[in-house]
Image (cartoon, helix red, strand yellow):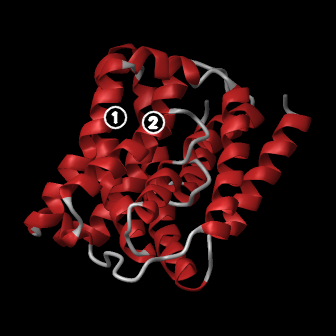
Amino acid sequence: MNFLDAILLGIVEGITEFLPVSSTGHLILTAEALGIPETEFLKTFEVSIQLGAILAVLLLYWKRVLLERAVFERLLIALLPALGVGFLFYASIKKLFESEMTVVVALFLGGVALILFEKFHTEKEGSVSDVAKMSYRTAFFIGLFQALAVIPGVSRAGATILGGLLLGLKRKAVVEFSFMLAIPTMIAATSLDLYQNASSFSQNDFWLLLVGFIVSFLVALLAIRFFLRFIENHTFVPFGIYRIVIAIIIFLVII
């Protein structure tokens, strides 16, 4: 990997992290298209630069995350399932990153799920409009939906958003909760990955991580604002169609 690769991957991560299209899946496929060898460093890089995008959320939502006790408590509860899955199945999850077919299938099925959801879902009167007022039970189950995103190609944002809507949250509330939930989730995931692998990295590897981290942070600041404006007047159907189209193209061209 060189610095141009790190910049391109950072851009892809910053754009896709908060959209229901799977940032991890796009990073894996972009690395394949760039001809970057599959190494332990690449896997760690793909996880670590997500933290750069997540810190863009912290910059925008730090008051709610750190100063509102009700929000902080619900984030901790929603984090528990992902921590459990990551701790118990770390090695198996890393192996999943090696399969392009896993990404393609997850992209396709996720696109179908988004389209079907928008067709049949109706927001109920009385849906929760503030994440601070959701029940602890709801927060935990959203965390379970997020845990599905350990599978490459399953969007963390998409899983938590659809889960929150099914559990009775309003669209903007669940999107904001998905954004904020990414903060402790990715801090935990990145810390675990670096702890497991950092001793084998060179000084140049750490510079590549830093470049990807900074680029993803800057691009994510723009992507978050776009997505929040987009959901005010649009459904998730365009993202569902995109996932299906990109999965088919990847299957035909790459696989």
Figure check: 238 above or below 99? below
Q: How many marks?
A: 2
- Decide: is 127 above or below 201: below
Q: Local crowd at mark 2 within 10 Å, few (<14), some, or many (≥20)?
A: many
Callout 1: SS: helix
Mark 2 belongs to which amino acid? Val
Residue, x 38% and y 47% (percent of image)?
51
* Dot 2 or dot 1, earlier in sequence: 2
Q: Is residue 231 left or right of residue 64?
A: right
Q: Can you give x and y, in whole percent of width and height, for residue 158 in the image?
A: 53, 55
Asked whether 83 or 134 is in front, the reply is 134
Above or below residue 145? Residue 126 is below
The quarter of the rendered structure image containing the C terminus is: top right
Which quadrant of the structure image shows residue 75? bottom left
Q: Identify which residue is drawn at 69% across, 53% down.
A: 111
Depth check: give the residue in front, 7 or 57.
57
- Residue 47: percent from left, percent from top: 45, 36
Instruction: Give the position of the N terminus as an image quadrant.
Output: top right
Graded by Cα atoms within 10 Å as few (under 14), some (14 to 19) or many (20 or more), the crowding at tag 1 reads: many
Residue in the image at 33% along x and 37% along y: 82
- Residue 200 in the image: x percent, y percent? 39, 13
On the image, the x and y values in percent for residue 165 come to 45, 65
Q: Is residue 193 left or right of residue 208?
A: left
Q: Are marks 2 and 1 in contact (CB under 8 Å)?
A: yes
What's the mark number on residue 47?
Answer: 2
Residue 20 — which label? none
One can see residue 135 in this view:
yes
Q: Is residue 208 visible?
A: no
Reading the image, the residue beneath label 1 is 189
Label 2 SS: helix
Type of the residue with mark 1: Ala
